[in-house]
Structures are given as structure tokens and as C-alpha cells.
Image (cartoon, helix red, strand yellow):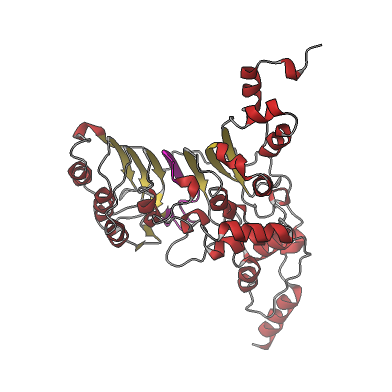
Amino acid sequence: MTSIFDLPTELLFDIFSGDNLTCADLGRCQQVCKTFRDIIQHCKIDYTFKVDVTAHSAWRLIRCLLINPQIGERFKSIKVTWHRRRPMKPKTWAAIWSWTKEEREQIEHLGSEWLTGDTIRAIWTGLNSEALLPFLLCFTPNLESLDLGEAFEGLIYPTFTAREGIRVIEASCGDGYKWSPKGNYDDGWAYYDAISAGTTPRREDVHPLWFHMNLNPKQWLPGLANITYFAHDYKDHQDPNGFYLGWPAQYLAKILLLPRLQTARVRHCATIEFRQHIPLFDTVNSLLTARRRSTVKRLELVDSCFRQEDYDALAKLTGSLERVEWSWVSETSRYYTSLASISEERVAKAFLRRNKRTLTPEQVFLVKGEPGSESEGENKEGEESDLGSDDDSYYYISDSSSDREDDDDDDIY
């Protein structure tokens, strides 16, 4: 009877390169025999990084890499999908991850050279697996492609009330529903902020990801040093009030300086949020002082919320472009009413002037599409098709004692 050991090397290579085997599976296969070990060591890995998926695949991967870091050298591409916790949907509430003392020490030791201290602490917290992505990039020096997908920077998606947020976080931590209002004016947000503190980057004028917080052109993460393809979208590009949201363009300026980047596909990037404009000139000029220029040959800036001067600033970073595709959030958009018109001719001239040797007018395209044409369904890549039943509404009913106090006040007046 033929066994797996009788199969030709080429077929074994195809088997071990398949998507059905996890890194943990490959690690165990390597221990079977010298033949398996030699074959697996040459297999490239195309990995799907699932943020906050309930199966904890990202956390388990890092645990595996802490034991066998050589596996990271075989990562060829990473595609990120987003599975944030949903209000009222317990099936999506990923439980908190616990590290051993030895693992925490390893994470601090390995991460301290590359990551911010806040990122390491967020990893320790065990609630936001997105914090693991920059740490994973410390293990993947041969990575060629990184697609961040439709990113979402919060722990819970979509918009939620304080009671819902508290219920989700406490349930994820294995706690009962402890919170109750301390007074008539306690809406719960202070308590939610306290129990979720440190899990996402500190917000100032922008809403960054942990990936953004660890972009350092002076010392790139090992997994970014050989990237040739990069893609980045943003999931929630319009808030309930109609204001435009997007991932912060100041980080795009840094991304364009990745040392071997050839293609950058950018969607829903912004210098404007809630009608506040954060221009790119200061960021770009600070990067140019180090005499850096982008190696990007193909640049796509789709449905981004920039002003004219922001395109001018980005163009200053380039010098090797062979194709530019762009579109902007127009004055007629439901997202944002522009205070300054965008000139198609001026945008094209900005990039042509900086890429005289490689770019022609025929290679600069204005992409035109209908606002809101993207799918709004639940079954986009990265989302569970079955979100399960709703949580018990008992946990979200207003505090009865507070209601009684309000009624008493009404009687007094």
C-alpha cells in the first residue's frame, strides 16, 4: 500500500504549500522526518491574518513563532481580514487571550527593539489582535505583499452605545455585567474608556492603527523591508452624521517610502475628518529632509479625501511612477462638501513634474465612479456570514433606580 512517504517531492511540496495547513500544522509536520522538514523549510506561506476572530488564530500563530521563529522567514504574503466584535452578537465576541509569564517576557524582549511600548502592552492585554500585526512583521523578513484590507480601528463594529460596549468587553474578559450608573448623568462612557484603555492607539487628531504607530522610516520593521505590494482600505468611511472618515494620510506618506515598494493601492485615505484638515506638507517636508524618495511605480489613490495641496505634497515624494490612478471625494459626495476645488489638470501636473523620466499624461487616470456603489451586505470578505442570535436585552435596559429618581424629580417640579 502506498504511503505519503512514497509520494514524489514535488507533490509533497504542493501539499505542504496548501492553504488548509496552519503554521502550527506545518511545525508539527516538520518534526515527522528529515524529508518533511527539508520540504517545509522551502514552502512559501500566504497567510490570512484574521483580526479578532473568535478562534484566536493570530494569537496562536504568535505563540507558535515564539517557539519556532524560523517559520516567519517563509511568509510571502499577508492578507488582513477584520472580524471585530459586534454589538448584541455574542457569537462574535472573541474572548481575551492569556499569555504565560515566559511568553510575556519573550514578547517584551523581541518587541522592544522594533515596537512602541504601548504596542507591547496592548499585546499583553489580549483583547485586540490587531496589535499583533506589527509584532508578526518582526518575524517575516522575506515578506513581499501586505494587504491590510478594510481596516477598522475600534474594538467593536459598528457604532455602539456605552452599555453595549461595556457588556461586550466585560463578556470578552469573562466577567459578569458589573456596571451600573453612579448617578443620573453617568452614561457609562467613562467606565467603558477605563476597561478598554490601552487596547487601541491613543487618539489625538487622527484615528490610527497599531500598524501605523510602528511605521518608522529610520528603522523599518523587518517584514516591511522587502515589501513590493501594499494595499490599504478603511471600512467605516462615513459616520452616522454623514462626515467623512478615512485612515490618516500622514501614514501614507511614510508607507510610500518603503524601500522596495512597487505597487501601492490606497482607498479611503484622508487628510480631512469631521471637516478638520490635517495637511500633508509638514509630514512630507520632514521626510524629505532625509533625502528619501519613493520607489513606487504604480500608485492608486481611490475615493480619498484630500485637498489640492495634499496631492502636491504626495507627488514630491515620488520619482519613479509609471502609472497613477486616482479619484477624490467630490463636492457632490454624500461624505464631504469641499471648501477648495480639486483640479484634475493640476493633480496630473504635480505627478508629471516629479516623474518626468517615467510618467506620461496618458499614464495618469482619473477614476470616476458612483458614490456608494460599493456593496453594503454582510457577506464581505473578512466578516462572518452567520453572526448568531442577539444577546439578552436584559443587559441593556436602563437602570430602574435612575428612572425612579427622574420620575421623583418630575413630581417635585
- Where residue 254 sits in the image (x, y, percent)? 37, 53
State the image quarter where residue 264 is shown: top left
- The relative height of residue 1 versus residue 70 in the rendered view (above or below) is above
Q: Nearer the viewer, residue 277 or 244?
A: 277
Q: Residue at x 52, y 41 (%)?
A: 376
Magenta stretch, overall SS: loop
Query: What residue span does the magenta drawing correspond to?
Result: 225-247
Residue 118 in the image, given as x and y percentages of width and height: 55, 65
Whole-percent x and y of residue 216?
Answer: 42, 56
| Residue at the limit of the structure toward the bottom, as seen here | 412
- Quadrant placement of the C terminus: bottom right
Q: Could one spot residue 233 in this view of the protein? A: no
The answer to whether 167 appears left or right of 110 in the picture is right
Relative horizontal placement of residue 218, taking residue 222 as reference (left or right): left
Q: Nearer the viewer, residue 370 or 342?
A: 342
Figure quadrant of the N terminus: top right
Q: Could one spot residue 357 in this view of the protein?
A: yes
Give the side of residue 184 with respect to residue 215, left or right. Answer: right
Q: Residue at the spot x=68%, y=47% of the render?
A: 67
**Magenta span includes 228:** yes
Q: Nearer the viewer, residue 245 or 20?
A: 20
Q: Is residue 173 magenta-colored?
A: no
The image position of residue 68, as x and y in percent, is 66, 44
